[in-house]
Amino acid sequence: MNEFVHRLNYRNMLVLLHHILGPLIKLTFTKKILLFFLKFIIPDKFCEFTIDNQKFIANPYIMPQWRSYVTDGTLPEEKMLLTFSYFCKDSTVVFDIGSHWGIYALFASKNIKPDGKVFAVEANRCNFKILLKNIEINNINNIIPLNFALGDKNQHQKLYEGEIKNSGSYCLNPVSSSKSKHYEVVEVRRFDDIAEPFSQIEVVKVDIEGAEGCFIDGAIKSLKNGKIKSIFMEIHNNLSSFNYRHKDIVRKIYSYGFMVYFFENGSNNLKRFSFHNATIKPPYNIVAVLKGCDLEKRLAYHERI
C-alpha cells in the first residue's frame, strides 16, 4: 500500500495558504495560484484522502475535478453526489455505471439497506484497479465491482483513451477521442441483461462519456416495466459522435414516465427540464425520477442536502 499511495499530508498547508490569501485576492484567482504551485509541490501520484470518514485514493493530476478538493475541500459534482447519496438511503439495489475510482459507490454503500448491494461498473482496467483498492482499504463488502462497459449490444468494443491527464474520459467512440490512438478492447453488455435478476432497482447513476444513448437503448425493457426508479446521468457534449442529440435522450427518459430535472451549469439549483429552453446545453447533469414512486417525494427535500 505504501508503494501505491502517496499520502497527502501537506493539504492542510494549502488550505491555510488559501485562507490567508482569500481576503486579499479573489477566490477564483487564489485557486489558480494554488493549483499552479500544486504542480511543483505534489508529485504525480495517487494520494489517500479522507472523505466522510472513508478513505479514498485519487490522483488530482489525472482527474482534474479533484484539484479543487485539494485546495479547498470541494468534492467533484458535490451537489449531484450528495443528492445521489440521499436517494440511495434505504435502497436495496444501486448501480454506479462509469464508476471510475468509486466515489459514488462509496457514498451509496453507506446509505443502502443492510442487505443491499451497490454494483460498480467500470470498463477501464486501470480505473478498475483503483476502484478495487478503494473498496479494499475501507473493508466494504456491499459493493460488487464489475469490469465491463454498458451499451446497446452485447459485444466487444474498443475503449479509447480520451483527454490527456483525465482518467475519467475513456470513451467507446474514436471520433470523440480523436486525440488519442490508445485503446483497450472491453466487453460491452446490455443493462437489461444484467438487471434481469432484480425486481426493482432504486437508483442508477450513469457517467459514460457520451454513450448515454447507447445505455438507454440497452435498458429499454427495464425502463418500460418501471424496474428503474431513478436515474442520475451526466449528459456529455460528444453525443453527436454517437448519433444522438442531448434532448432526444432526455425525451426518451421522459417518455418512460420519468420526471426529469437538471442542475444548472455553475449552480447547485435543481430545475425541471424544459425542451423549449434553448440555454440548456451539454455537459449537464440530470436527475430523473419515475412518477408515482416513493423516491419522487425526495426531490422536494434536495435543497436540505
Image: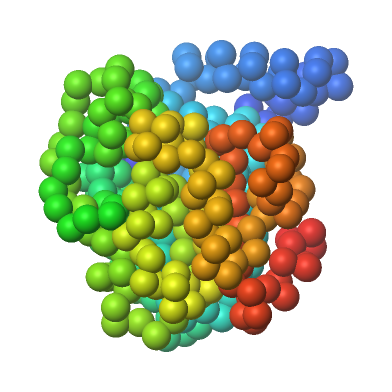
Instruction: Tell me: 20 left or right of 38.
Output: right
As drawn, 159 above or below 131: above
Taking depth in this image into account, of 165 and 189 the one nearest to the observer is 189
Residue drawn at x 39%, y 85% is 199
Q: Looking at the picture, does residue 293 appear above or below residue 131?
A: below
Q: Position of residue 1 (x, y in %)?
A: 28, 47
- Which residue does the image show at 28% across and 55% down from the upper left? 152
Residue found 56% across the figure and 36% down from its top: 283
The spot of residue 177 in percent (x, y) is: 31, 25
Q: Nearer the viewer, residue 77 or 71?
A: 77
Give left or right: position of 113 versus 30: left
Count of numbered labels shown in the rendering? 0
User: In this view of the protein, can residue 23 be seen by the observer?
Assistant: yes
**Residue 52 screen position, x and y as percent:** 58, 58
Q: Is residue 11 left or right of residue 167?
A: right
Closer-to-camera residue (248/230): 248
Q: Position of residue 247 (x, y in %)?
A: 56, 44
* Residue 44 figure quarter: top left
